[in-house]
Amino acid sequence: MATLSLRNVRKAYGPVEVIKGIDLDIDDREFVVFVGPSGCGKSTLLRMIAGLEQITGGDLNIDGKRVNEVGPADRGLAMVFQSYALYPHMTVSENMGFALRLAKVPKAERDTKVKEAARILQLGPYLDRKPKDLSGGQRQRVAIGRAIVRAPKVFLFDEPLSNLDAALRGQTRIEIARLHEELATTMIYVTHDQVEAMTMADKIVVLQAGRVEQVGSPLELYHNPANIFVAGFIGSPRMNVIDATVVSAGGGGVEVRLPSGAQIVVEVAAGAMQPGMPVRLGIRPEAMRIDPSGPIAGEVRLVERLGGLTLLHLGAEGRDDLIVQVEGTSAVEAHQAVRVSADGAACHLFDADGLALPRLARHQLVA
Amino acid sequence: MSATSIEAGTAPGDAAPAASAPARSFLVMPSVLVLLVWMIVPLVMTLWFSFRNYNLLDPTTQGFAGINNYAYLVTDPDFWASLRNTLVLLASVLVITVGLGTLLAVLFNQPFPGRNVARVLAISPFFVMPTVAALVWKNLMMHPIYGVLGVVARAFGMQPVDWFSQFPLASVIGIVSWEWLPFALLILLTAVQSLDNEQREAARMDGAGMIAQFFFITLPHLSRAISVVIMIETIFLLSVFAEIFVTTSGGPGNATTNLAFLIYARALLQFDVGGASAGGVVAILLANIVAFFLVRTVARRLET
Ligand SMILES: Nc1ncnc2c1ncn2[C@@H]1O[C@H](COP(=O)(O)OP(=O)(O)O)[C@@H](O)[C@H]1O
Ligand SMILES: [Mg+2]
C-alpha cells in the first residue's frame, strides 16, 4: 500500500531552478514512468522522492504523510541505480541482505528473504559470487534483488536498462513488468526511452525542463498529446510536423493548407481558429500511406527497410525528412516520385503556442 | 606479464616477425648483466666483509673471522635493542600514518571552504627533506627552551617537556610520522575520491549512517590503497637514518638506535667494518622477510 503525492515540488541548485513546481498523484500499485529528454530533471525528481536530494519547496507526501524531512532509509522506498551501485567487496547475498543486516534482522530471517528474492530473480546459483564475476544482466538483477529484499512500499528505478545491450534490454523490460505484477507494489521508473515508457507504464509523466508537460496513459499520450513537445516525444518514428495555414474552421473539423497548396481536413474542434491563422499540422508516419490521388506530392529521398515495415523519407512540403511508414512489401525505391495521403481523423493540429486542438472523436482505446 | 606485453606490441598481421626466444634473451643480456652486477657486487662484498676481520683502526688484524662478527652481533644487547627499535618505529609510524591518513582523507573529501588550500598544506610536509624536517622539529618545535611546544607549556604554567631525553623514541616516531602522513593522505585521498557516489547513496538508502558507510563502504574500498601505502612506507621506514642522526644520534644510550643507525655506528664510529657488514646482512635478511610477507599479502589484495 503506497500512494504518493507531490504538491508544487521544487528544486534549485543555488540560483538555478531545475525542478519548477511539480504536481503529481501516484496511486497504489501504479507503474509510473517519468520520461523526457536528457537533462530535463527526471533523475533529480526521483532522487528527491528517494530522499537523496533536499527538496527546495513544496510537499512530498507518502500515504498522506509529509516526508520532506524524513531520511532516505526511513521513507520505505528502495532504489535501483543506473550504475547498479553494487557493493564490490560483498557477495551477491551480502549485497542483497545488507539493508536487513543494518536493520539488525536475525541471520536466519535474512537468509530466508534473500533466498526468496533470489528465487524470484533466478539468482540462486550466484549467491556466493562477487558482483565482478557476474554479467551485466545478472548485476542488474542483483540490484533489483537488493530492492526486493527490503519489501519497500515503492520501487524507484533510474534508467535501469541503459547499460544493457538491446536484446537484454527487451528481456529485462518484460521481467520488470512481470515483477510489478508479482509484487503488486507502486513503482516509479525513469527513462529517456519512449519505447520503455510506452510498453511498461500505467501512467506516463512527460517532463521537459523541470516541468510536467502531460500525464496520462501511454495511448492517451499517443492519441491525444497535449502539445507539440509530447507529440514529438511519444511515438517512434517521430511525428511529422508541417507548418500550415487555416483555410476554414467548422463543426466537421479544420481545413488547412500546406506549403505546396495541398489541403487537408483535420478532425479537431475548431475553437478560436480563424481562416488565415498559422498552425502546425502533425501527422504520424503510420497515418500516411501511398495514394496516387493523395494531396501531398514528393520524392523519396531514402528508403529504410525494417523487414515488416518500410520507412520512406520524403522530400515534400519544403522538407526533406517527412517520414511515411508503409508495408514491408512495398516496392517503392529511392528517387521515385510518389503521392501520399494522410488520414484526417488521425492528424493533429497545434496552434501558434504549440498547444493541441482537441480531437473531435476520442480513440476507442482511450475513451 | 612482460611476454604478453611484448606480444601485444606486435599487432597481428605485423610484417616483422617477433624475435625468436634465444635471440631475444641475447638482446636483453646487456641490461640484465648491468643490473646483476649492480645488485650482486655490493651484496657479495657485504657478505665477504661480514666474515672478515676488518677494522679501520687496526689494519694489522686481517684474515677470516669465521662467524665471529655474527657471534659478537647477536650477543651485543645493542643489536637486539636496535632490532626492537626498528620494528617499533615501523609499526608505530604505519599505524599513525594509515590511521590518521584514512581519517583525514575522508575529511578532506567533504566539501568545506578553503578545501584546496587545506589539501596543499596537509600534503606539503612530504616535500621537506628529512634532515631539515628533523632539525626544525628538534630546534624549533620540541626544544624545551626555544621550541614552540615548550613555550606553549610555559604559557599554561607547566614544566616544558624535554622530548628527546624523556621520550626519545616517541619523539622520533612523531617526526617520521609527520613526514609520512602526507604521503598516506595523498594516496588515500585519491582512493576516496574514486569511490562511486552511487554506492554511498545506495548504502544510505539501505539505512547506513555515516559510521556504517565508513566501515562497510569506504574502508573496504580503501583496502587496496592502504596496502600500497603500507608496502611503500615499510620499505623506507626500515632504513630511517637522517632523523635519528640529526636529533638523538641513536641515544640516549641505545633508546633510538635502529638497525640502520647501528650499522653506521659500527662502521664509521667504531670503525669495525666486519661487524657492520654482519649487521648489514641481518638488515638484508630482515627486509627480505618483511618484504616476503608484505608482497604476498599485497599481491593477494591487488588481485581481487
Ligand atoms: N548537483 C547539481 N548541481 C547543479 N546542477 C545539477 C546538479 N545535478 C543536476 N543538475 C542539473 O539539473 C538538471 C537535471 O538533471 P538530471 O535530473 O540529472 O537530468 P535527467 O533528466 O537527464 O536525469 C540538469 O540540467 C543538470 O545539469
Ligand atoms: Mg538521469
Image (tube, rainbow, N blue to C red):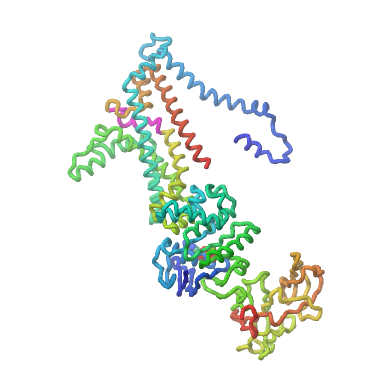
Out of A344 and A131, give the one closest to the viewer.
A131
Query: Does the segment drawn in magenta span residue B39?
Result: no
Q: Is residue B42 above or below residue B155?
A: above
Residue A128 screen position, x and y as percent: 52, 47
Out of B287 and A167, give the one closest to the viewer.
A167
Residue visible at 78% across and 80% down in the picture: A294
Number of numbered tags placed on the structure image: 0
Figure quadrant of residue A167: bottom right
In the rendered structure, the answer to whether residue A358 lies left or right of residue A115 reads right
The residue at the far bottom in this view is A250
Residue A129 screen position, x and y as percent: 54, 47
Q: Is residue A347 above or below residue B205?
A: below
In the rendered structure, the answer to whether residue B28 lies left or right of residue A112 reads right
Figure quadrant of residue A339: bottom right
In the rendered structure, the answer to whether residue A67 lies left or right of residue A306 reads left
Out of A184 and B36, give the one closest to the viewer.
A184
Query: Does the segment drawn in magenta span residue B242?
Result: yes
Residue B163 screen position, x and y as percent: 26, 35
Range of magenta residues: B237-251
Residue visible at 58% across and 64% down in the picture: A178
Residue B159 screen position, x and y as percent: 19, 39
Looking at the rendered image, the quarter that the N terminus of chain B falls into is top right
Figure quadrant of residue B131: top left
Out of B9 and A61, give the one closest to the viewer.
A61
The residue at the far left in this view is B157
Residue visible at 38% across and 34% down in the picture: B90
